[in-house]
Each structure stands twice: as C-alpha cells, then as structure tokens.
Amino acid sequence: MLVRFNFIRAALAAGVLIAGLSACEKQETAAEGPGPAERAGQQIDQAAKRAGEELNKVAEKAGKGLQEAGAKLEDKAQEAQKKE
C-alpha cells in the first residue's frame, strides 16, 4: 500500500513538473515570424490553390470539348432526320 501511495505521489509530482516546465517555454515574438508548422501550412495552402486553379483549367477544357461534341452530335442527328 505504501509503495502504491509513493508511486501515485511521484507520478503527480512528475505531472506538475512537466506542466510547469511547458509553461516556461519561450514565447514566439512577432519579429521571429511564423514557425515551421505555420510555414508548412502556408505552403500547403498555396499548393492547394494552384491545384484548384489547374483543375479549373482542365474542367473548362473538358466542358468546351463536351459542348463541341454535343454540337456535332446534334448536327449529325439533324442530318439523319433529313435523310429519312
């Protein structure tokens, strides 16, 4: 029982010590700029933006192709009706 109590007390002391040390961490100042995670996030955002723009271009080309194909199909259908 005493061993269990000492273990619990040591665990609590370690938890308080870790929490206290993490609170003493150096705070980022505005002069330092964004940290590595924020820079990585910005790069991901930029890559996603570029990918979206490229997808829009591809979708626009595909849409034009579908319109042209639809127009050709409509022309062929009208020609077929005239032959009947």
Image: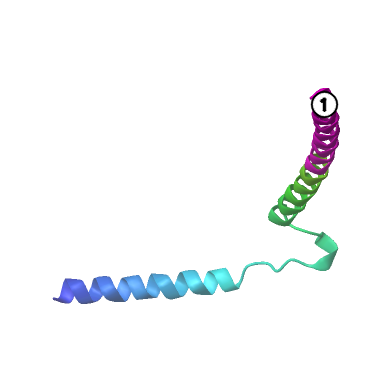
Residue 39 percent coordinates (x, y): 75, 52
Q: Residue furthest left?
A: 1
Residue 65 percent coordinates (x, y): 83, 32
Give the left or right position of residue 30, taking residue 40 as reference.
right
Q: Quadrant of the N terminus?
A: bottom left
25 or 77: nearer the viewer? 77
- The answer to whether residue 64 is above or below residue 44 is above
Magenta residues span 55-84
| Picture residue at 83% right of the left edge, 44% below the top | 53
* Residue at numbered disc 1: 76
Residue 73 percent coordinates (x, y): 80, 30
Q: Magenta region, mostly helix, strand or loop?
A: helix
| Picture residue at 38% right of the left edge, 74% below the top | 13
Is 75 covered by the magenta stretch? Answer: yes
Is 67 covered by the magenta stretch? Answer: yes
Residue 45 percent coordinates (x, y): 76, 51
Q: Residue furthest top?
A: 83
Q: Quadrant of the C terminus?
A: top right
